[in-house]
Image (tube, rainbow, N blue to C red):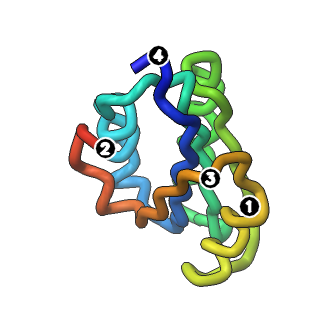
Amino acid sequence: MENAPLITIGIPIKNRFQYIRSLFEAIDDLDYPKKKIKLIFVDDFSTDGTYEALVKWKNEVEEKYYKVVLIRERTNIPQARNIYLNTRLTSCMLLENDKSLHQPKIY
């Protein structure tokens, strides 16, 4: 998969601390080259520790991925999708919510 295209995965998130570890595991389990994945998380000012968990995870894994972007902004899901589209670098885009990224194969 050396010639795999660079992809962007956009995930809106708010107050999902109880699920965040499962989300991180699902992302890590993707059967796709990590250096070909740009991750964009848009956090709507979580108050339960979700954003802090994202920051910690980003610091632990950002060398594995092409790029990990954290955006903290008052938003809803359609607005978050517009943010992804404006910040992506790729022609391949996967828009997910924080509970749906569970399949390891994305191609």
Q: Which amino acid type corresponds to the residue marked 4 in the rendered image?
A: Glu
Confirm or deny contact between disc 1 and disc 4 (CB under 8 A): no
Q: Nearer the viewer, mark 3 or mark 1?
A: 3
Q: Which residue is mark 4?
A: 2
Residue at 40 percent across and 61 percent down: it is: 98
**Mark 4 secondary-structure assignment:** loop
Helix, strand, or loop for circle 3? loop
Q: Say how many tags the image has.
A: 4
The local crowd at label 1, few if under 14, some if 14 to 19, many if 20 or more residues have their Cα within 10 Å, is some
The residue identified by callout 3 is 91
Residue in front for this viewpoint, 83 or 45 = 83
CA–CA distance in space, label 1 to label 4? 33 Å
Left or right of 18: which side holds 39?
right
Classed neighbour count for the residue bearing mark 3: other residues with Cα under 10 Å, few (<14), some (14–19), many (≥20): few
Q: Residue at x 52, y 67 (%)?
A: 14
Q: Are marks 3 and 1 in contact (CB under 8 Å)?
A: no
Q: Please name the amino acid that badge 1 sits on.
A: Arg
From the image, which quarter does the N terminus lie in? top left
Rounded to the nearest angstrom, the CA distance separating label 2 from label 3 is 14 Å
Lower sequence index among marks 1 and 2: 1
Q: Position of residue 101 (x, y in %)?
A: 32, 53
Distance between the Cα atoms at labels 3 and 4? 17 Å
Report which residue position mark 1 lands on.
Answer: 72
Name the front one of labels 1 and 2: 2
Cα distance between the residues tagged 4 and 2: 14 Å
